[in-house]
Image (tube, coloured by chain):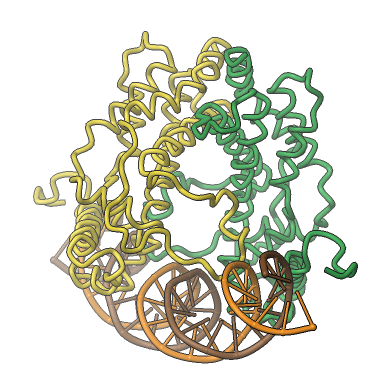
Chain colours: A yellow, B green, C brown, D orange
Amino acid sequence: MPVTTRRAGLRERKKQATREALREAALKLALEHGPDNVRVDDIAEAAGVSPRTYNNYFSSREQAIVAAVTAEREARVAAAVAARPAHDTLAKAVIEAVVEQYTDQDDPGPDALLLITTRTSLREVFIDSATAIEHPLTDAIADRLGDPPDNTDRHTARVLAASVAAAVRIALEQWVQPATIPSTTGAPSTTAGPPTTADSPTTGRLVVLSGSLPDLLRKALAPLTPALDAAEHHQR
Amino acid sequence: MPVTTRRAGLRERKKQATREALREAALKLALEHGPDNVRVDDIAEAAGVSPRTYNNYFSSREQAIVAAVTAEREARVAAAVAARPAHDTLAKAVIEAVVEQYTDQDDPGPDALLLITTRTSLREVFIDSATAIEHPLTDAIADRLGDPPDNTDRHTARVLAASVAAAVRIALEQWVQPATIPSTTGAPSTTAGPPTTADSPTTGRLVVLSGSLPDLLRKALAPLTPALDAAEHHQR
DNA sequence: CACGAAACTTGCGTACACGCAAGTTTGCGT
DNA sequence: ACGCAAACTTGCGTGTACGCAAGTTTCGTG
């Protein structure tokens, strides 16, 4: 092994480079030509890989664009929880870590956010991206609860992490909500009819980000505080 | 309007009939020829509709098969919560309703369950089906909390419902888990490589349903009890 | 330093999802 | 009873997802 490979393998770095290239190419093209006028072939070409390779990294066209905005928040949230002082309540640690990581976003740029909030499919993927924190967060919470590392169950930690993820999801949902929607409460297949047309096609940026994200996050996480506290007290 | 149309419109009934026909056709064919040897065209043909219509009812091939097993559990869970006696704790109402509805399943048949647990893609859709209870459950919980009906926020109810859904999802996940998996902790695109091969292709029914579903549900829901209780007390 | 295995890329082929613009059915108002 | 509008179905066309079986690169090891 020559000194040229400084850290953690060349392979891994190339992979990350490709991933980032795809992310940024996707976002750039989407901003330039509009999200619907970008085919995966374009993204792949702009990133210098084959279209097939694109799908080795992202399983849908929207994921790449959204990934450019969310970057690797999942891992960072979990790390932030672990980094909170030990005397913090579990509830406080989680809430502060989440708010912190979603606030000091490395500014995706307001244009990128507009892009995502405008198109329904992008909104959905963006909102669902919150569930990605579930697994890392499970580890972080289990750690704080003092769970034995070999314990494969970790019921409580898993449920709490999933609940936190769900709360974050709801906060994001409210944040990017296009003002007041008509109805659309049921499952995606409730109406069944082909009038599955768009929501606001050329309405042109009427979406307003309702409320500040930190506030929404705190409000959404507040109801979970009792559960987090209880888990903490019960465990020790 | 002649007396022939007895209740709730002919249109609606036809739609439900088509939906059910598709569900059952999908399950039947999947059981006969194996889940991979069934194309949507086959399902559509067996149900007597065009392939295009299939996608007006289900947005993926797996959804129809899973829907045949889960039927309309979402709505029934919400109804069950509303039906619990008024003196019940919110926590108790929710837990009992969930357990009840997932226990007295109109027996999908063990073969159907095996089918779902065997194939990874089916497992995923099945597990995700738990999130469908979120919206009905939000209404039911908001109702019990005495939220004003015009209140469009209902932060607490939404978060609690989402958390319950997440807990149910985790219980189902554990229930259909194929024994002990190696790792697979990260997001679906973490490994990135095309070695995206199957998990247990011809292993032939080695999956064992670990533990009884009611037990798993109660264990998963238990950590949320404090949050449910707190919401209830705070609201009145 | 060379070699073999494992990881990754890529082209190909197939199946799928879905917008669109007809054509058909249902249901409601008059 | 008639007719129109909304709901639903369907064929078509395009773009997308992904298994497979090469070809290529990386990496550990003797």
> Is D17 on the left-hand or right-hand side of B104?
left
| Location of residue B14 by image quarter | bottom right
Q: Position of residue B164 (x, y in %)?
A: 61, 33
Res B15 visible: yes
- Taking the view exactly as shown, the residue that stands out farthest to the left is A4
Question: In percent of the image, x 73 and y 23: which residue is there?
Answer: B92
Res B61 visible: no
Q: Nearer the viewer, residue B95 or A212?
A: A212
Q: Position of residue B163 (x, y in %)?
A: 56, 33
Question: In percent of the image, x 44 and y 23: which residue is there?
Answer: A143
> Is C11 on the left-hand or right-hand side of B173?
left
| Location of residue C8 by image quarter | bottom left
Q: Nearer the viewer, residue A28 or A78?
A: A28
Question: In percent of the image, x 83 and y 68: which residue is there?
Answer: B1
On screen, A16 above or below B24? above
Q: Nearer the viewer, residue A66 or B38?
A: A66
Question: In percent of the image, x 58 and y 19: which residue is there?
Answer: B231
On screen, B14 above or below A13? below
> Is B141 on the left-hand or right-hand side of B113?
left
Query: How many tags in the picture?
Result: 0
Dividing the image into 4 quarters, which one contains the C terminus of chain B?
A: top right
Q: Position of residue B13 (x, y in %)?
A: 77, 65
- Taking the view exactly as shown, the residue that stands out farthest to the right is B3
Q: Nearer the viewer, residue B78 or A201?
A: A201
